[in-house]
Image (tube, grey):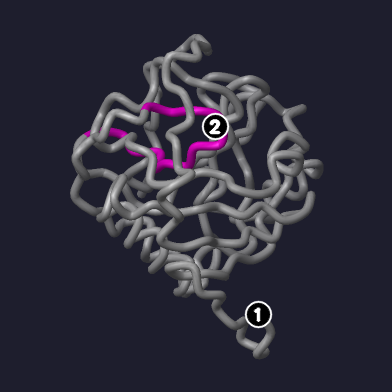
């Protein structure tokens, strides 16, 4: 069975870019939390602003704390567009694919460079799949299930360095990575047929309300 977010922007066939949605001014509003993605290209730190999307922010942080975002492929990685991820082949984690949350009110931030949001497929379909934007994307972010809940605060160079050579996923590219096969064959399929694909090795919350959070081993 497909994850609820599988059909994310299935109807979008062109990658229009427009700077009409600028990055929100966060100079006086520190993030509610920060999450470290340790990736095969290096660290990416995402700031989460709960007031942007409370349900989305809380769900994301709960998934991180559950250990969901470990050994996760960036299976859709398109130059000038976005990278999509959030499918696990861990038997203890796959149940989260079918757990969805209600939409949040869209605060009108749009999808700007570095924004992180859910790859939803319609009302109330947000689950585990996420995307981070490489550019300003004028045609995304208008629907409640697309509203951003945070953005990259460190590691833009790492975000930009993610391997994009395989291009779009199936069905936009018949030679691309197929989500359905990931869900049946797991990451072994990605590593065997698309060996340059980057992965999230692990993730953890490193800060809450400005206070550093200790790692499991006691390190901050």
**What range of the chain is rendered magenta?**
110-122
Identify whether 218 is placed above or below 62. Answer: below
**Residue placed under numbered mark 1 in the picture:** 220
Between tags 1 and 2, which lies in front?
1
Image location of residue 125, percent across then percent down: 26, 44
Q: Residue furthest front?
A: 28
Task: Say above or below: 71 vs 138.
Answer: below
Residue 32, by quadrant, is: bottom left
85 or 213, nearer to the observer: 213
Q: Which SS does the magenta portion mostly show?
A: loop
- The image shows residue 81 at horizontal and vertical percentages of 58, 23
Which residue is the extreme one toward the bottom?
218
**Mark sitting on residue 133:** 2
Q: Are marks 1 and 2 in contact (CB under 8 Å)?
A: no
Residue under the point 43% across and 48% down: 28
Whether residue 117 is in magenta: the answer is yes
Name the side, left or right, on which 170 lies relative to 167: left
Which of the labelled discs sits on residue 108, or is there none? Answer: none
The local crowd at label 1, few if under 14, some if 14 to 19, many if 20 or more residues have their Cα within 10 Å, is: few
């Amino acid at each position: 069975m497909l994850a609820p977010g599988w059909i994310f922007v299935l109807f979008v066939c062109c990658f229009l870019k427009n700077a009409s949605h600028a990055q929100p001014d966060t100079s006086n509003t520190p993030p509610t939390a920060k999450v470290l993605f340790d990736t095969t290209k290096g660290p990416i730190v995402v700031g989460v602003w709960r007031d942007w999307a409370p349900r989305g922010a809380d769900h994301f942080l709960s998934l991180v704390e559950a250990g969901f975002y470990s050994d996760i492929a960036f299976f859709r990685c398109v130059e000038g567009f976005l990278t999509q991820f959030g499918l696990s082949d861990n038997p203890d984690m796959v149940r989260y694919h079918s757990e969805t949350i209600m939409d949040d009110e869209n605060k009108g931030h749009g999808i700007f460079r570095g924004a992180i949001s859910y790859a939803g497929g319609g009302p109330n379909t947000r689950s585990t799949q996420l995307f981070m934007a490489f550019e300003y994307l004028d045609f995304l972010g208008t629907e409640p299930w697309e509203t951003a809940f945070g953005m990259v605060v460190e590691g833009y160079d790492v975000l930009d360095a993610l391997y994009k050579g395989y291009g779009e996923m199936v069905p936009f590219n018949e030679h691309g990575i197929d989500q359905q096969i990931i869900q049946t064959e797991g990451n072994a399929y990605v590593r065997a047929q698309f060996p340059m694909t980057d992965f999230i090795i692990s993730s953890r919350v490193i800060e809450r309300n400005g206070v550093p959070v200790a790692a499991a081993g006691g390190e901050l």
